[in-house]
Image: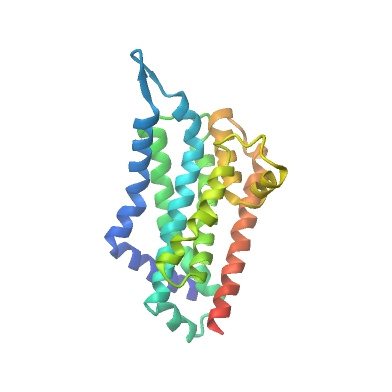
Amino acid sequence: MRSLIIAKRVTKQIWQDKRTLALMFLAPILIFALLEIVLVVELNGIRNAATFNHMAPHLLAYLVFFFVFLISGIVFLRERINGTLERLFVSPVSEHEIVLGYFLGFGLFVTIQTVIIQVFLLFVLDVPNESHFLLMLLVNLLLAATALSIGILCSAFARTEFQLIQFIPIVIVPQIVLAGMFDIAHVPDFVMNLSKIMPLPYGSNSLHQLMIHATTIQEIIYDILILLVFVLVFQVLATLIIKKHKA
């Protein structure tokens, strides 16, 4: 119940921040539109969209992950800077309830954002898709939930928004490189092994299999379970970090 109260307050606060809403809902689709303009070219009068269509599942995973991580991290950090989190520390609310409350509060907007991005990709840009819309959405929401948990965790470490931004080359960039869009078949084994402890490659691979190869849920169930484990692990880690701050 107390987590729901926190979630309601977070939801109300984000809803009143029009700039955050604009960044959350408009920026990803503008980037997608720009990428299509750049990657889809006219060759001898014939529109060649093969490159963009091949990259689209990976780009979808990247944008969902990146924007959820960025927005959730900044908003949660702002709560610390404004003293809101400290007021929760002196209340009877537990650390787990704090993390869950913020997770649920952000989760509403993350869900809307993910749906908007996926609808724009499939029905506005008309990218070919061999999978069911809801199955794709399931993978995207799990990926977004993972990014949300990592965003909360990283913002618990950071003291300023600049420090949070510094997590991007550490947390985001390596995952983008290893998430499937680039050929890493000939990289050293230890680099390949790094991708196994990162959530983005699992989500990106699942979306690629779904959209390109019409994969069924049974064939990507391993990736789905791994993403669920990542969500739980990062939730627990964020709770422990907040507990340390509270002490």
- Report whether 189 appears left or right of 78: right
Taking the image as drawn, is residue 97 in sight? yes
Query: How far from the left and from the top, in percent, is residue 117?
Result: 40, 43
Query: How far from the left and from the top, in percent, is residue 142?
Result: 55, 51
Determine the residue located farthest toward the bottom in the rendered image: 90
- Give the colour scheme of this rendering: rainbow
Query: How far from the left and from the top, in percent, is residue 56?
Result: 47, 34
Instruction: Write the residue at 57% across / 78% down.
Output: 243
Q: Nearer the viewer, residue 244 or 16?
A: 244
Q: Is residue 69 above or below residue 94?
A: above
Instruction: Write the residue at 43% across / 68% down.
Output: 76
Q: Nearer the viewer, residue 226 or 181?
A: 181
Taking the image as drawn, is residue 8 in sight? no
Q: Is residue 62 above or below residue 102?
A: above
Determine the residue located farthest toward the right in the rendered image: 189
Where, quadrant-wise, is the C terminus in this rendering?
bottom right
Residue 86 picture quarter: bottom left
Query: How far from the left and from the top, in percent, is residue 153?
Result: 53, 66
Q: Is residue 211 above or below residue 61?
A: above
Instruction: Write the residue at 27% across / 59% down.
Output: 18
Q: Nearer the viewer, residue 40 or 17?
A: 40
- Report whether 240 appears left or right of 105: right
Instruction: Write the residue at 53% across / 29% down.
Output: 130
